[in-house]
């Protein structure tokens, strides 16, 4: 507690300084009224995982016919899982131009290095990882191990591939006693696609023969539970919802109990998006993680969902969420856009968090296991 | 997590002390650091190249003045350049002569269009307008439901109908006319910039409603891709301005700079929190400081302004410097501080804060024991903590559920702070409240207080008011706080 006191004292002192300045500022005439917006309950109360009476169970009424009337694009009749090459090829360009330039030169010049560096940075690989990769290659060029641009590019690819090798990317599902469901918890900042990921994954898991129950743990965002319910109806999963503004831990605990009672195999637990800088919300998430492990379920995955457009902040996100919830893997969404998702190199190598799934499109079948070789091939694709 | 640019430059600067002029080699070395800082802030590679070239021109041959060290001078140049690039002008909304003024919201999935539609509607309401929102996102399940819920919260009507987004938008416009609303905000589905069908759809929506303003919503956490996204949307829709969302995180928001530079349209609004009220017009100078990692003093001041009663703050500040500050005042100020949001966020906004403190996790919960201790004291004890003896200490500890050690620490540290403040008050000579009547806020540091260690270039907006620096560990001031752990 002692360091807290210092911080508080300092903060108070600073604020006084500001107060002093304010004395001379005319107070903005129209003090803005604060709209009655929903405020999340701070996670102050001790975890009391009592199932909320308001939670309701929606039985799975949906059939395929019903699902087709939904506006969401539906999978083509010919079901084929998307591949990186076809999906990411739409967005080639950033790297391709640079690589063409590099190959067109007779030898390895200063411009070659500049072009390479720029290409990597454009893919959001980040300054540090880029420097590391290029330093290693520079040494090998100096020692004449690598002599021409083609060999250089091949060596870079091999180097990047080796960095992503060896990780276990399979989603953990432990078949166990009936009444002890696996729990996969989804966390991440706002707008990365947690709810959509759960919807798609539920479909796949059900197709693979597992029974699935969704826990609508996002009790904050307006209509988040409705969004998940739509997905539950489409996929035939069950869903447990709480009331808006309710305690997410209670909803998730309740969902796990329900799944246990019904011998359901897998609980997919949604949480509200939150910025990793909000201490109170991260504390709330810690509680969710703790409570999820308390009942009859086993938390076998905590998946951090990251948007492929995320820049260098992605590393901070991964670190903070990892600290708070023992993240076991990453889901990289929206990789079918023009973003390259290079931040996963830093996340994998610096934090050791494997990317397990990637989102390559809007249909259910576009959520696929991450394949590092394909990912890197797609980055280097030239035509 | 990232070091601020100024602390990055510190090492280089040390060697340069005593030099009269910055040579090209010195500047190159600094530019490398600047380049890294910008790239880590997600400024687009191409934009970084242009910025550094311009900065080099200005920096080479710069006279190293007595007052500023070369590092500070360079940071000042960089800051000025970034501010200029981000645009001096804030976007002024020109309302359509024939209402409604139509606004189209566009962007990638998850960038925050729906939330920001509601925030924008609330903003227009606060400007005395009567907005209506149209939910034309028929793609994402429950997106319209989300918009309706938000609409109810701010008491703004929402129009939507199932079917085709283009005709929904058209009917929304008719509805706005029928209801006599003067601002129409059309929320659209998130779409990838390379999805030709979806881009064609939003072009059609735009053609039908003929927006007066088309806003592109961009997530502050976006990386290098921000530029290609902005270019693609601009080519299809002719963007008028950008709304930066999720600026309340710790992303540096280099995307803002890049987008402004590439499409030449201003950042109009910034979303700074989850509450619908946390939305404001964009301030380029603050953003520049943020990209460079120099904190955001101006925002801090504004937040403080909203949280504190002016008179109360004035009185407290005077008391503080006179050494008459009691635990009661401390408690009162702590309450006000809590209104400003989690302490950790505030720490992050203060420029020059030592890293240990920025990273310290303090939630409001951790303030509770302190509060409890003070509340367990009698009024006399709060005024004169020196009378607290063994038995009083025991009583306080029992009453607050803490230990005697905790009580001791609080009392001791409070006394130290009091002493320090008194000394500072004497040094400053003048009462803060009585000077610089016309002075711009943030520019008036106390005399004799100097800049922050490793810190902010003087003359930058947001010089730290009040003598905080002497309290910092590095500054070696008497009565400073012991090191943190």
Image: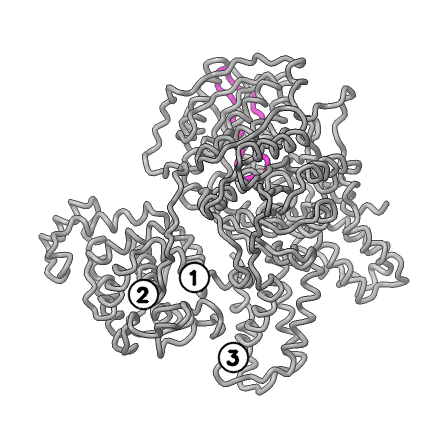
Taking depth in this image into account, of A194 and B415 the one nearest to the observer is: A194
Front one among A75 and B391? A75
Is-magenta flag for residue A187?
Answer: yes
Q: Which residue is mark 3?
A: B69
Q: Is residue A330 visible?
A: no
Q: In the image, is A64 to the left or to the right of B362?
A: right
Q: Residue at x 41, y 58 (%)?
A: B300
Q: Is residue B128 magenta?
A: no
Using the rendered image, report if marks 1 and 3 lie on a common chain: yes
Could you say which quadrant of the image residue A122 lies in? bottom right
Q: Residue at x 34, y 67 (%)?
A: A24
Q: Chain of mark 1?
A: B
What chain letter is assigned to the residue under label 2?
A
Q: Is residue B461 visible?
A: yes
Which mark is nearer the camera, 1 or 2?
A: 2
Reading the image, the residue beneath label 2 is A23
- Point out residue A218 in the picture as x, y percentages from the top left corner: 48, 31
Outermost residue on the front side: it is: B98
Label 1, label 3: how far apart the Cα atoms are? 21 Å
Relative to B75, is B15 above or below? below
Q: Which residue is mark 1?
A: B350
Depicted A248 relative to depicted B255: above or below: above
Observer-side mark, 3 or 2, equals 2
State the predominant SS element of the stretch in magenta: loop
The reply to whether callout 3 and callout 2 are in contact (CB within 8 Å) is no
Q: Which region shows up in magenta?
A: A171-193
């Amino acid at each position: 507690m002692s360091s807290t006191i210092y911080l508080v004292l300092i903060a108070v002192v600073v604020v006084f300084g500001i107060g002093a300045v304010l004395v001379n500022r005319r107070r903005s005439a129209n003090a803005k009224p604060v709209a009655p917006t929903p405020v999340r309950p701070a996670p102050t109360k001790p975890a009391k995982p009592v199932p909320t009476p308001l939670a309701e169970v929606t039985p799975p009424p949906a059939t395929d016919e019903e699902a087709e009337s939904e506006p969401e694009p539906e999978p083509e009749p010919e079901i084929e899982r998307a591949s990186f090459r076809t999906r990411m090829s739409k967005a080639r360009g950033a790297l391709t131009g640079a690589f063409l330039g590099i190959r067109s030169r007779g030898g390895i010049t200063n411009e070659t290095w500049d072009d390479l560096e720029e290409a990597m940075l454009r893919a959001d690989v980040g300054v540090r990882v880029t420097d590391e990769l290029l330093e290693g290659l520079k040494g090998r060029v100096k020692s004449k191990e690598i002599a021409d641009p083609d060999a250089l590019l091949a060596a870079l690819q091999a180097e990047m591939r080796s960095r992503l090798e060896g990780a276990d990317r399979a989603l953990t599902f432990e078949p166990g006693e009936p009444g002890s469901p696996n729990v996969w918890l989804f966390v991440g900042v706002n707008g990365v696609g947690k709810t959509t990921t759960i919807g798609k994954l539920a479909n796949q898991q059900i197709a693979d023969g597992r029974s699935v129950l969704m826990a609508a743990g996002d009790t904050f965002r307006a209509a988040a539970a409705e969004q998940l319910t739509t997905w539950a109806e489409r996929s035939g999963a069950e869903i447990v919802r709480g009331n808006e503004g309710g305690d997410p831990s209670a909803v998730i605990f309740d969902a796990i109990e329900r799944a246990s009672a019904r011998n359901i195999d897998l609980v997919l637990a949604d949480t509200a998006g939150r910025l990793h800088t909000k201490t109170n919300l991260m504390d709330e998430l810690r509680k969710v993680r703790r409570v999820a492990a308390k009942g009859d379920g086993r938390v076998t995955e905590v998946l951090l969902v990251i948007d492929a457009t995320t820049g260098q902040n992605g590393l901070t996100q991964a670190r903070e969420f990892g600290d708070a919830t023992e993240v076991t893997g990453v889901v990289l969404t929206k990789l079918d856009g023009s973003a390259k998702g290079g931040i996963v190199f830093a996340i994998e190598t610096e934090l050791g968090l494997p990317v397990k799934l990637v989102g390559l499109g809007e249909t259910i079948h576009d959520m696929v296991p991450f394949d590092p070789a394909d990912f890197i091939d797609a980055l280097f694709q030239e035509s | 997590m990232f070091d601020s640019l100024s602390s990055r430059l510190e090492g280089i600067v040390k060697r340069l002390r005593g030099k009269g002029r910055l040579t090209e080699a010195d500047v190159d070395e600094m530019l490398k650091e600047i380049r890294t800082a910008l790239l880590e802030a997600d400024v687009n590679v191409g934009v970084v190249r242009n910025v550094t070239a311009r900065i080099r021109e200005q920096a080479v041959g710069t006279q190293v003045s007595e007052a500023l060290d070369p590092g500070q001078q360079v940071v000042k140049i960089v800051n000025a350049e970034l501010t200029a690039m981000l645009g001096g002008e804030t976007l002024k909304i020109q309302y359509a002569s024939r209402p409604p003024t139509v606004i189209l919201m566009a962007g990638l999935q998850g960038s925050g269009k729906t939330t920001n539609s509601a925030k924008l509607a609330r903003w227009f309401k606060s400007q005395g307008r009567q907005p209506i929102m149209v939910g034309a996102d028929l793609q994402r399940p429950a997106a319209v439901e989300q918009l309706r819920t938000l609409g109810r919260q701010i008491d703004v009507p929402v129009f939507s109908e199932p079917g085709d987004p283009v005709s929904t938008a058209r009917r929304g416009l008719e509805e706005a006319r029928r209801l006599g609303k003067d601002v129409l905000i059309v929320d659209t589905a998130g779409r990838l910039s390379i999805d030709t069908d979806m881009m064609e759809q939003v072009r059609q929506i735009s053609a039908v409603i003929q927006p007066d303003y088309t806003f592109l919503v961009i997530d502050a956490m976006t990386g290098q891709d921000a530029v290609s996204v902005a270019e693609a949307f601009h080519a299809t829709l002719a963007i008028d301005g950008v709304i930066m969302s999720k600026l309340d995180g710790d992303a540096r928001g280099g995307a803002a700079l890049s987008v402004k530079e590439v499409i030449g349209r201003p950042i109009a609004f910034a979303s700074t929190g989850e509450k619908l009220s946390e939305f404001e017009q964009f301030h380029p100078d603050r953003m520049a400081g943020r990209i460079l990692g120099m904190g955001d003093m101006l925002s801090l001041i504004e937040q403080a302004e909203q949280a504190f009663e002016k008179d109360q703050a004035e009185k407290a500040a005077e008391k503080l410097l006179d050494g008459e500050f009691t635990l009661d005042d401390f408690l009162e100020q702590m309450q006000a501080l809590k209104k400003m949001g989690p302490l950790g966020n505030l720490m992050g906004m203060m420029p020059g804060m030592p890293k240990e403190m920025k990273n310290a996790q303090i939630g409001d919960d951790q303030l509770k024991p302190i509060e409890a201790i003070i509340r367990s004291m009698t009024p006399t004890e709060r005024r004169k903590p020196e009378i607290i003896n063994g038995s009083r200490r025991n009583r306080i500890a029992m009453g607050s559920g803490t230990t005697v050690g905790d009580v001791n620490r609080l009392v001791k540290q409070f006394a130290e702070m009091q002493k320090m403040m008194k000394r500072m008050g004497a040094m400053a000579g003048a009462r803060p409240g009585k000077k610089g009547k016309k002075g711009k806020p943030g520019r008036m540091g106390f005399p004799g207080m100097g800049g922050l260690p490793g810190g902010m270039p003087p003359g930058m907006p947001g010089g730290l008011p009040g003598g905080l620096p002497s309290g910092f560990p590095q500054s070696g001031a008497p009565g400073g706080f012991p090191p943190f752990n």
